Image (cartoon, rainbow, N blue to C red):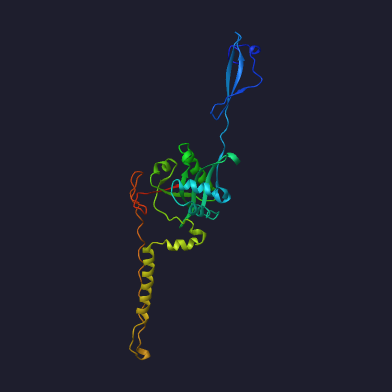
């Protein structure tokens, strides 16, 4: 047996000077070389040269305004809306959030738009971002691009210094659980409001009504105590027989509210509902 593994001496093998390239639809390049055998016949030897697939990357859409309309059409395939309204929403993407990421493959003329995801701030959680509008092109589904899109989104969030991603889903909870997301409790997504409303204002508006009522009640009780301590009518007496004013009433500090109870939920059962009354799963992942 010779070194080439075909049972022929090296001096009996003749390679054609020009390989014959296959016209197959296989994305790999296939070259056929002519090999002479002992009986004078010719055989074709297949040599396959694999070509690396184009690199997949994610960029903020405000860095690629030329993709506004194609991205609007992509998102509208999943959530129907007028193209003008969708483009207007995408134009709000900025470095200060929200950020609309687009998943791309290739460069130049071979570039393809694969997917989209939007990141917004979370009210009251400075280290968290909210992921929404996660969608992969219909023609590219089933190829692993959903996982790639989430991985690129997490990498971008980490590069901006954030530690947690939050999201909601109606029916993809098993997919997100496979990526490391766990069931969570609701948070408030700031959306595009952070572009014109300070986060401190949003946090004040998001305070629970019970908290506001408690603060107002304490204020009223303090005011009532001040009136009771100094507002009564006293009979004028000689200075030598006047009594000292009564001490102010002490207002007991209300006990702290009990910690919130986390409702029971599983990947198949959730107590939460969206605005339409449909079951919705809240999830998060520490990145």
Outermost residue, bottom side: 238
The quadrant in which residue 212 appears is bottom left
Residue 229: percent from left, percent from top: 36, 79
The residue at 37%/81% (across/down) is 230
Instruction: State whether residue 101 is above or below residue 29.
Output: below
Left or right: 213 with respect to 144?
left
Left or right: 205 with respect to 58?
left
Left or right: 33 with respect to 226?
right
The quadrant the N terminus occupies is top right
Outermost residue, top side: 39
Residue 100: percent from left, percent from top: 51, 50
In this orientation, which residue lies closer to the viewer: 195 or 20? Answer: 20
In this orientation, which residue lies closer to the viewer: 9 or 3? Answer: 9
In this orientation, which residue lies closer to the viewer: 115 or 208? Answer: 115
Does the image show residue 69?
Answer: yes
Residue 49: percent from left, percent from top: 58, 27
Left or right: 178 with respect to 97?
left
Instruction: State whether residue 122 is above or below residue 35.
Output: below
Tally of numbered tags? 0
Does the image show residue 287?
Answer: no
């Amino acid at each position: 047996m010779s070194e080439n593994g075909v049972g022929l001496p090296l001096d009996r093998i003749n390679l054609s000077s020009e390989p014959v390239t296959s016209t197959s639809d296989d994305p790999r390049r296939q070259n056929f070389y002519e090999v002479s055998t002992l009986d004078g016949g010719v055989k074709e030897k297949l040599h396959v040269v694999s070509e690396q697939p184009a690199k997949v990357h994610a960029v903020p859409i405000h860095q690629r305004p030329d993709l506004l309309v194609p991205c609007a059409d992509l998102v509208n395939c999943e959530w129907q809306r007028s193209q003008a309204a969708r483009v207007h929403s995408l134009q709000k993407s900025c470095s200060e959030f929200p950020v609309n990421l687009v998943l791309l493959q290739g460069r130049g003329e071979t570039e393809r738009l694969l997917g989209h995801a939007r990141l917004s701030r979370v009210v009251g959680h400075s280290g968290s971002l909210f992921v929404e509008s996660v969608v992969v092109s219909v023609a590219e589904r089933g190829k692993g691009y959903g996982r790639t899109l989430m991985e690129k989104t997490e990498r971008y969030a980490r590069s901006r210094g954030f530690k947690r991603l939050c999201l909601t889903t109606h029916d993809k909870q098993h997919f997100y659980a496979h990526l490391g997301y766990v069931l969570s409790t609701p948070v408030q997504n700031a959306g595009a409001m952070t572009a014109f409303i300070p986060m401190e204002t949003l946090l004040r508006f998001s305070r629970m009504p019970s908290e506001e009522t408690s603060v107002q009640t304490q204020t009223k009780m303090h005011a009532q105590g001040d009136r009771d301590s100094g507002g009564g009518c006293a009979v004028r007496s000689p200075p030598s027989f006047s009594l000292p004013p009564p001490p102010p009433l002490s207002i007991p500090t209300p006990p702290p509210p009990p910690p919130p109870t986390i409702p029971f939920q599983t990947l198949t059962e959730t107590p939460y509902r969206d605005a339409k009354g449909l079951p919705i799963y809240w999830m998060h992942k520490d990145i």
